[in-house]
């Protein structure tokens, strides 16, 4: 696994690069969270969701939110459903949202993380 260290005026963070999920546990080693919600779409769900849930469930209480793949899902109705799931699953300020997927998934999960409880941590896989 390669690691890039990013430093901005406000904070620093690592970016981990790997061609498999074999190092995922190690990448999450220093991340504490009361609960994790994996956000993904129907395409990625079929291929990766259960594997990632299994890995993250070793350390965290994990839930998931899956929405229909595609740009058409990038709307406030889906955001409202996602935020409702975060509330129903009782995520708190110490919880973590994990985006499992590409552009639309990252946009939706990142936006939800930024507005839920005035902002909670977010990781993109």
Image (cartoon, rainbow, N blue to C red):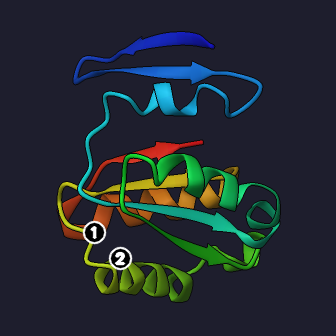
Residue at x-position 55% and y-position 53%: 99
User: In the rendered view, does 92 fall on the left or right side of 66?
Assistant: left
- 18 or 80, nearer to the observer: 18
Q: Residues within 10 Å of mark 2 (few under 14, many from 20)?
A: many
Q: Quadrant of residue 91?
A: bottom left
User: In the rendered view, does 46 fall on the left or right side of 14?
Assistant: right
- List x then y, in percent, for residue 42: 76, 72
Q: In terms of sequence position, does the residue under pointer 1 or pointer 2 come before the other?
A: 2
Q: Quadrant of the N terminus?
A: top right
Residues at circles 1 and 2 in contact by the CB criterion of under 8 Å: yes
Judge whether 74 appears above or below 62 on screen. Answer: below
- List x then y, in percent, for residue 85: 41, 83
Q: Quadrant of the C terminus?
A: top right
Residue at x-position 73% and y-position 79%: 68
Residue at x-position 23% and y-position 56%: 34
Disc 2 element: helix
- List x then y, in percent, for residue 31: 31, 35
User: In the rendered view, does 105 fall on the left or right side of 36?
Assistant: right
Judge whether 89 appears above or below 47 on screen. Answer: below
Q: Residues within 10 Å of mark 1 (few under 14, many from 20)?
A: some
Q: How many marks?
A: 2
Q: Please, which residue is most extreme toward the front here?
A: 58
Q: Label 2, on which residue?
A: 86
Mark 1–mark 2 distance (CA, rounded to whole Å): 8 Å
Q: Nearer the viewer, mark 1 or mark 2?
A: 2
Residue at x-position 46% and y-position 79%: 82
Disc 1 element: helix
- 32 or 55, nearer to the observer: 55
Q: Label 1, on which residue?
A: 116
């Amino acid at each position: 696994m390669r690691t890039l260290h990013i430093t901005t005026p406000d904070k620093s963070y690592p970016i981990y690069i790997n061609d498999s999920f074999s190092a995922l546990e190690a990448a999450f080693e220093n991340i504490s969270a009361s609960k994790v919600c994996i956000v993904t779409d129907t395409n990625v769900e079929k291929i990766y969701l259960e594997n990632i849930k299994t890995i993250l469930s070793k350390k965290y209480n994990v839930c998931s939110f899956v929405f229909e793949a595609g740009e058409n899902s990038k709307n406030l109705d889906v955001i409202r459903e996602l935020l409702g799931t975060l509330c129903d699953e009782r995520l708190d300020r110490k919880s973590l949202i994990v985006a499992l997927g590409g552009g639309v998934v990252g946009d939706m999960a990142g936006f939800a993380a930024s507005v839920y409880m005035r902002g909670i941590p977010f990781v993109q896989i």
